[in-house]
Image (tube, rainbow, N blue to C red):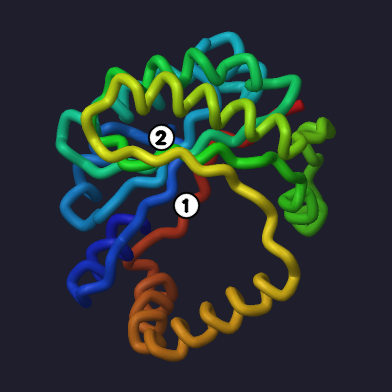
Amino acid sequence: FCIEIAKLLHERGISVYIDTCGYAKRETFEKIIPYTDKFLYDIKAIDTTVHEKCTGRHNRLILDNLKFLCEKGCKIEIRYPLVVGYNDTECENAAKYLSGLQGITKVKVLQYHSFAASRYKALDMECTMPDEITEEEDVAKAVEIFKTDIFNDKDYDAEVKEYKMKPKKNLVKMLKGASSMLDNNRNIISDIHTLVEAKKIPFPAFYCDWHR
């Protein structure tokens, strides 16, 4: 599904950013690289034990795929979702690991929130998201760690940013912008819908989610 959509958008001259946790087969990345402008890549932990506690899955495949994308010269923005009590002790490990890779254009430390909990309820699924609260101060500390280990050792232009929840007025502005974008790309959306309806492109659901 993602490969076909990325190809369709690429052919229409629209930039393609792939948001991924990296938990996918190598050949999937090989196929989608030609149509991708940048990968938004989640790193939750470097230590295997910590990662398994967070997600219930091993992280070898995720880290191997990240190295592969770097070796292929892809542009990558790292997303580090910070969850106190889970991976806040992994910031230094992650920073040191990333400092040895090329192609990292930006690192974002994301403040954990539980907005997605409503999705579990809507799908009548057990919510596995952590109950812990991550404060802005926690994010600020993590940002400083990434700045120290990445900026001081890299010769490329990287950027570390904090992530803060947007006020409602900004959210309304974002929604209006999204609506405008959809109006301008209705033909593309129609093409995608037609392909899905015709089952020419399947709609899978793979993810490596947080566990309590």
What residue is at 41 percent from the left and 19 percent from the top?
149
What residue is at 73 percent from the left and 44 percent from the top?
113
Disc 2 marks a residue whose amino acid type is: Gly
Given residues 87 and 142, the one toward you in this image is: 142
Residue 144 placed where, x, y %? Answer: 54, 27
What residue is at 40 percent from the left and 15 percent from the top?
96
Q: Quadrant of residue 154?
A: top left
Given residues 157 and 11, the one toward you in this image is: 157
Disc 1 marks a residue whose amino acid type is: Pro
Residue 109 placed where, x, y %? Answer: 55, 37
Q: Residues within 10 Å of mark 1 (few under 14, many from 20)?
A: few
| Residue 61 visible here | no
Q: Secondary structure at mark 1?
A: loop
Q: Is residue 101 left or right of residue 41?
A: left
Q: Is residue 72 left or right of residue 122?
A: left
Distance from Cα at disc 1 to Cα at disc 2? 15 Å
What residue is at 48 percent from the left and 36 percent from the top?
42
Q: Is residue 109 above or below residue 61?
A: below
Mark 1 sits on what residue? 204
Q: Quadrant of the C terminus?
A: top right
Given residues 117 and 109, the one toward you in this image is: 109
Q: Quadrant of the N terminus?
A: bottom left
Residue 162 placed where, x, y %? Answer: 57, 43
Q: Earlier in the sequence, mark 1 or mark 2?
A: 2
Residue 173 is labelled as: none
Q: Secondary structure at mark 2?
A: loop
Q: Quadrant of residue 202?
A: bottom left
Mark 2 sits on what residue? 22
Kindly indicate whether the residue at mark 2 contacts the one at mark 1 (C-beta within 8 angstroms). no
Residue 60 placed where, x, y %? Answer: 41, 17
